[in-house]
Image (cartoon, rainbow, N blue to C red):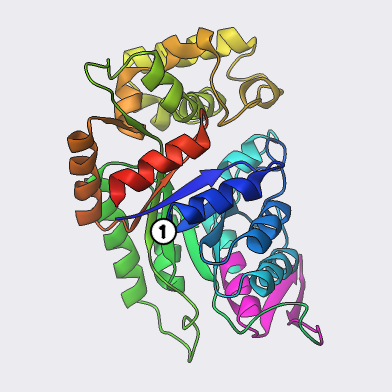
Amino acid sequence: MRAGVVVAAQPGVEDLAVRAEELGLHSFWVNDTPMVHGDPFVALSLCAKATSRIRLGIGVTSPALRSAPAAASGLASLNALAPGRIICGVGTGNTARRTLGMRPTTAARLEEFTVALQDLCAGRSTEYREGDRVREIRFLHAGAHVNTADPIEFVVAALLGPKAAAVAGRRGTGLVSFGLLDPTAWHALHDTRRHAARGTPRAPDAHADSRADSYVVTSLHLLGEDEDPHGDAARDATGHLVLSLLAFAADTIAGTPAFAEQLGPEEREAVRRLLDRRGTTATAPDRHTKLYPNYLGPIAPQDRDLVLPSLMNALALVGTRDDLLARITTLEQAGVDELLIQPVIDPPAEMARLAKLLT
């Protein structure tokens, strides 16, 4: 299986990209969460100039954050700096919207956005809508301002729901998911994508610029000899993923009873403790300002008790070398093409361990 990395945009990110390229990793992604992390287009511009081979991804942007013309201009500009190396993840903006105290956008709007980006980034005209006003738009640049000749890879962010996977099928894109390590769930996503693709007539060259690879974002902790798989080191390496799920649960549990029903008693208690610890409630209008600071950053030692073994096992890869390779092989057999780790403790060391494991 291929390997890549996802990081937050910040000064020095290009040094991590260079190191990832030196290690032979396939891709290097930057989050697009404006109120939590830096700007991914700025970060990837630095990475594009500092590297020559590694693919560069935005994971993920959304029509709830950026207009199609602005996003397409950023992507095509990156493509001019790193021709044929750009990956654009698109999604409903689940996290990026919730950090604003807002709801994600719809799958229908996501699909319109994806269509527009694919068209514009391939040099085609596309339909652009603002309210009741609809216009055909295209790049009007003269010269080498943007690159629409080399293909940009598009992937749609999907969890367990079928709607995003169906968008990927209709648009001929790949998939990216966060912490989805269940092979059965991956089979279901791929089945949905294939079914949607079969029912979609393809216009000439409509998807010629698309790939259809699948990526999973997780964290990886290789256990030392006799190390506790749920000890402090393992919790620190995976806690950012677990806390992100608990924050999402705390933010949505009041309005999404179906989600709450999927949580066990111990997990619901962890959500309750997180809300209490952050000094907010599941219905407070400003809860996003208390739940999401340091989102996907290193966890505080006092929060280690919230990193439940059940959630560690579900969201992250922790084990001996043989354990990890067995789980990765199972994911590969389920159709996952690339494992993306999100390191927070010591990114260079974690990237090196990933590269050594998969080479």
Residue occupying image coordinates x 45% and y 57% = 164
Q: Which residue is nearer to you in this view: 111 or 226?
A: 226
x 73%, y 62%: residue: 67
x and y percent of residue 189 in the render? Answer: 32, 55
Residue 296 appears left or right of 219: right
In terms of image quadrants, where is residue 79? bottom right
- Quarter of the picture containing the N terminus is bottom left
Please tell me whether residue 139 belongs to the stretch shown in magenta.
yes
Residue at the extreme front: 22
Q: Is residue 304 visible?
A: yes
> Could you tell me residue 219's position as x and y percent?
40, 36
Q: Which residue is mark 1?
A: 175
120 up-or-down from 193: above or below: below
Vertical arrangement, residue 128 with respect to residue 47, above or below: below
The residue that appears at 24% across and 38% down in the rendered structure is: 324
Frontmost residue, 154 versus 84: 84
Q: Nearer the viewer, residue 181 or 289?
A: 181
Residue 169's place in the image compared with 257, above or below, is below
Q: Callout 1: few (<14), some (14-19), or many (20+) C-alpha neighbours within 10 Å?
A: many
Question: Would residue 31 be seen by someone viewing this image from the given angle?
Answer: no
Number of marks: 1
- Magenta highlight range: 113-142
Q: Amino acid at mark 1?
A: Leu
Residue found farthest to the bottom: 204
Residue 304 at x, y percent in the picture: 45, 12
Magenta highlight on residue 117: yes
Residue drawn where x is 50% and y is 79% of the image = 209
Secondary structure, mark 1, is strand
Q: Position of residue 52 (x, y in %)?
A: 57, 66
